[in-house]
Amino acid sequence: MAQTIKGLDVVVKIGTTVIGGQKNGSLEISNDVTDTTTKQSGGWKENEAVLTSWSSSCEGLFYISDQGYKAALDAMITKQPVELEFSNTGKTFYRKGKALITSLSESAGQDGVVAYSTSFTGTGPLTITNSSLLNEAKEK
């Protein structure tokens, strides 16, 4: 039976520090494509993947003394890349790479608590590890 990983167990970290109060996190990997259509393509458009990029985001509740949020805010203001990690506690699900913080917003609704949302854009490669998948590949 396939083993699943609970979303509750996966968090976004800056370095080794969790950005606190997280309610949601995501990571996206995408390829840019270039049009390679020619007259010999038979009327069908053809493309080739040329560049791979990645991005991440998280949102949650603002905690006054949270060091992860402070690190994100500092990196945003100073325009410095951070070491971003998107993983679970046992690191059986693990993604890591350098990223720039491209947005950080805070909201304070009348009937709620202060919340944040932040977006990251990868700069360079993303390390991807799924230890359970790697173990299965070694056994074959």
Image: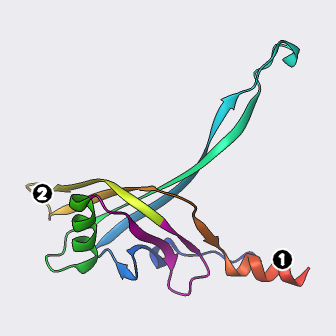
Q: Residue at x 50, y 85 (%)?
A: 89
* Left or right: where 60 falls relative to 91: left
Residue carrying label 2? 108
Say above or below: 98 vs 123: below
Pointer 2 local density, CA inside 10 Å: few below 14, some 14–19, many at least 20 = few
Q: Nearer the viewer, residue 22 or 47?
A: 47
Q: What's the amino acid at mark 1?
A: Ala
Q: What's the amino acid at mark 2?
A: Ala
Return the x and y of residue 61 as percentages of the image width and height.
Answer: 23, 68
Label annotation for residue 137: 1
Return the x and y of residue 5 as percentages of the image width and height.
Answer: 59, 75
Q: CA distance from mark 1 to mark 2?
A: 48 Å
Residue bounds of the magenta highlight: 79-97
Q: Residue at x 35, y 67 (%)?
A: 23
Return the x and y of residue 15 as percentages of the image width and height.
Answer: 40, 78
Q: How many marks?
A: 2
Q: Residue at x 14, y 61 (%)?
A: 112
Please identify, in this view, whether the residue under mark 1 or under mark 2 is nearer the observer. Answer: 1
Return the x and y of residue 27 as percentages of the image width and height.
Answer: 50, 59
Label 1 or label 2, whichever comes before in sequence order = 2
Say above or below: 15 vs 100: below
Pointer 1 local density, CA inside 10 Å: few below 14, some 14–19, many at least 20 = few
Per the image, is 81 magenta? Answer: yes
